[in-house]
Amino acid sequence: MDYIANTDLERESMLREIGVKKIMDLFHDIPKELILSTPLNIPGPFSEFELLSELHKISTQNRPTLSFLGGGNYNHYIPSTVKAITSRGEFSTAYTPYQPEISQGTLQALYEYQSMICEITGMDVSNASMYDGATSLAEAMLVATKIKGKKRVLASKAINPLYREVLKTYANVAEIEIREVDCQDGLTSDFDTEGSSAILIQNPNFFGLLEDLNTIRERAKDLLLITSTTEPLSWAMLQPFANSDVDIVTAEGQSFGNPISFGGPGLGIFAAKKVYIRQMPGRLVGETVDIQGKRGFVLTLCAREQHIRREKATSNICTNQGLCALAAAVYLVTYGENLGELARLNNQLAVYFSEQLQKIEGIDLVFNAPFFNEFIVRIDKGILLKLTDVEIGINLERYYPDLKDCYLVCCTEMTPKEIIDRVIHEIGK
Amino acid sequence: MKLVNEKSKAGSSSFPIKELDIKSNIPAGLQRTSLTVPTLPEVEVVRHYTNLSKANFGVDNGFYPLGSCTMKYNPKINEVVANRPQFSIHPLSRENRLPLKIIYELEKYLCEITGMDAFSTQPAAGAHGELTGTMIMKAYFEKRGEKRTSVIIPDSAHGTNPASVSLCGYQPVQVRSSSAGGIDLVDLRQKMDKTVVGIMITNPNTLGIFDENILEITQIIHDHGGLCYLDGANMNPMLGIVKPRDFGIDLIHLNLHKTFSTPHGGGGPGAGPLGVIKELEAFLPNPRINENLEFENSEESIGSVHPFCGNFGILLRAYAYIRAIGAAGLRKVAENAVLNANYLKEKLKKHYHLQYDRTCQHEFVIDDSLMPNGVTTHDIAKRLIDFGFHPPTIYFPLIVKGAMMIEPTETETKENLDAFIDAMKVIKEEASDDPQKVVKAPLNAPIGRLDEVRAAREPKLTWCRDEE
């Protein structure tokens, strides 16, 4: 198979027009000794049917499990509207909307996305997306140190440990010191603000628990308060971040209409207070008018960006996750105001599962603070052996050695009560 | 068109949720009292976005010669593959052999195509790959105890290059292009010394020229102990023809959403896997995948730049593409991309000024210097929309005044190229006979020319409730 459109005859006539004999004459600038004389060692070509059969064959190597894994990626139902829209070629095969007159679809959809993120979080501005939750948080850290001028930030240990790895990588080259803040009973404990630009808090935190943002805000008076969320469905149930005077909100938006897909692509959400607009990374879509005065949308404030400012840009980001932001928008509009009920259902299922698990001897709830749809239980090894086809949660010991035999368990609408009851029954056997 | 927020109607969602009779553990004080999300019945959701899509233009709609963006056809089978439910796997699941096998194999293919020894699929886009590559160069020199402070970048480079190196605390140092369009070797020799990390180069460059001095360029860098990073945005014309490693490249990122046919999504998601030579392998992001399909960490790694393995959904599409066309198909891609570009160039240079008049690779740059009546590149771009084409990349590279950078790719038919040539000819004629037609364009687009200055002067970035 190939996707070349021209015939041999056409190729010949084109070569004639160019005035060369054969295609390889067009490669004469390449030093001769560099031209490959043997074909690449790559399998194929394969027909569509062959490709799919092969994939089907290797798929059987993976045993499907019943999964209660969350911790950064969440298995939510995706309404059929989402794929129907995102698979439209007009959206999916377009480039970044540099030519607004033929990109109004992408631009308006992103403007609406920005508006929805602002409405839900209460923040003033949202960009049109970043790579994912982790790099979004890392970029917020970079922004904060530029605004405040101090090369140190505080980061709660209750931030997803994989996100903290990414933070460290970025901090290392930007020569930023990350001071980690300990946790007590699963919540970020007290901290010293001296000499820091910002404090980074995940909410709900990695343990699924709700942080006391108002108290953190009071303690962190002169610091930027930056939040990270991996399960933004929680936003539909919780007080908006603006109410706790958060400066920058970052999140992984995969929960909104994007499949788990082995951890990527995700959707980096980045929203902030108005005063930080000119320091923000990423694309921003703004409203304007055309020559007839008709409303339209364009990429704007580009003077922040690499294609204009080059080394002085606020970030190096170019390609982002436009189609994932579109998926999020369609997802949000499809559920509409019922999103609050969906969030409550997730919370109820987690409460139910945690209560049922605690009744079993050998299983304890580790922390007592309120949680959204994830919680931690300590499970005796013997019990785990019974769960051969179930992945009950993320084993936390590799990230927190103190949390031996502890699992982060996640419930969504995809693990309804009947499934929970079945698992409880299996454990009780 | 009305915004979805303006169409919203409370109580109209087609997606009711059945809550359970279980009391929440979250205190009332932490819960929100109201939630506003635009709400529409399903049919109106679908119509809203379908109508929006009609105001958009993708490769599926027509010719999209956006230079350096490689807007080739995105095969539909890639989507079928990526949407298989078997791939909806949690990244921390113990059942991860299938995705790891695919990533491992894809890394091998990319090594074979570029000549590199190892790849990491973590970078989520090209600029992310550049950043990761710069981090690796930094770690490499730190390990050697060498203090180097700058990176050489040609004046024809993409804007992400200087932005990426400055994020790592390096000073970008610009090297001039020669009158032939390649790198000025005299300038390069003058600027390269032992305080310089190396070069971040694009080859073929953004003029579409394969630098015939490439071996000398990389030699100059290596002679001073420096490293050569290749911005692989322009990999398309080299597939199966030449391996970047063979001309002295030490690190390269590939844009899977350009060369390897994954759709660009109106601005992502893409993928920017990074390849390196053996000497740099230990610095690649953690974790790596070994031949037993297990995760493995290196102590010298720069750390991770993505929580998992990068944009797996995009990796899958590229994997399907490479296997579908195979080695022979890859070479045909390069050959036909270069043939199409040269054909267009030869035809267009009869009407437009071509500053670098020589054989090109995947793209070439013409400009507006021959246009009568003050008609500019901007006007030409807008007028092309009326003819049903997406405009080329404009005003880039910066070294050509009024640049139009044109990359047709291998998937365009001769008929499409001829139609584009005709349109460009007509626009040139209009510019002299009826310039108003060009300056006022587009005339047949969903919307007229937009006021970008106003958008930036009074930024309005969200819809407000009080607009109702």
Image (spheres, coloured by chain):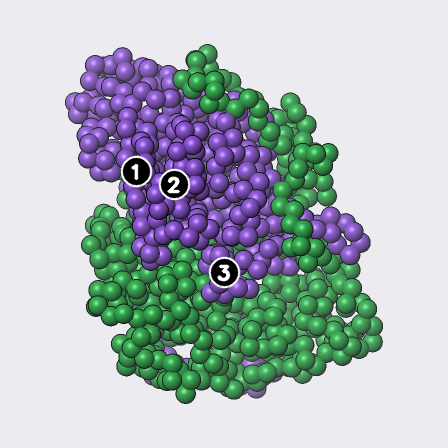
Q: x, y percentage for residue A172?
A: 31, 55
- Tell me, yes or no, if residue A25 can be seen here: no
Say left or right for B40 vs B161: right
Q: Amino acid at mark 1?
A: Val
Q: Which residue is mark 3?
A: A313
Secondary structure of the residue carrying numbered label 2: strand
Q: Helix, strand, or loop for circle 3?
A: loop
Of all chains, the one bearing label 3 is A
- Residue B331, placed above or below residue B271: below
The chain shown in purple is which?
Answer: A
Task: Pick the residue in front: B425 or A327.
Answer: A327
Nearest to the observer: residue B377 or residue A218: A218
**Disc 2 residue crowd, few under 14, some 14–19, many 20+, Cα 10 Å:** many
Mark 1 chain? A
Distance of label 3 from label 2 (alpha carbons): 24 Å
Q: Provide residue B71's location: percent of width, then percent of height.
A: 54, 62
Q: Nearer the viewer, residue A401 or B28?
A: B28
Q: Colour of chain B?
A: green
Residue on which disc 1 sits:
A181
Q: Residues within 10 Å of mark 1 (few under 14, many from 20)?
A: many
Q: Is residue B248 left or right of residue A212?
A: left
- Specify the label residue A199 is tagged with: 2
Residue at the image position 24 percent from the left and 70 percent from the top: B146
> Which x, y percent locates residue B342?
56, 78
Tag 3: amino acid: Ala
Q: Nearer the viewer, residue A37 or B55?
A: B55
Q: Residue shown at 21%/14% (left/top)?
A: A361
Q: Are marks 1 and 2 in contact (CB under 8 Å)?
A: yes
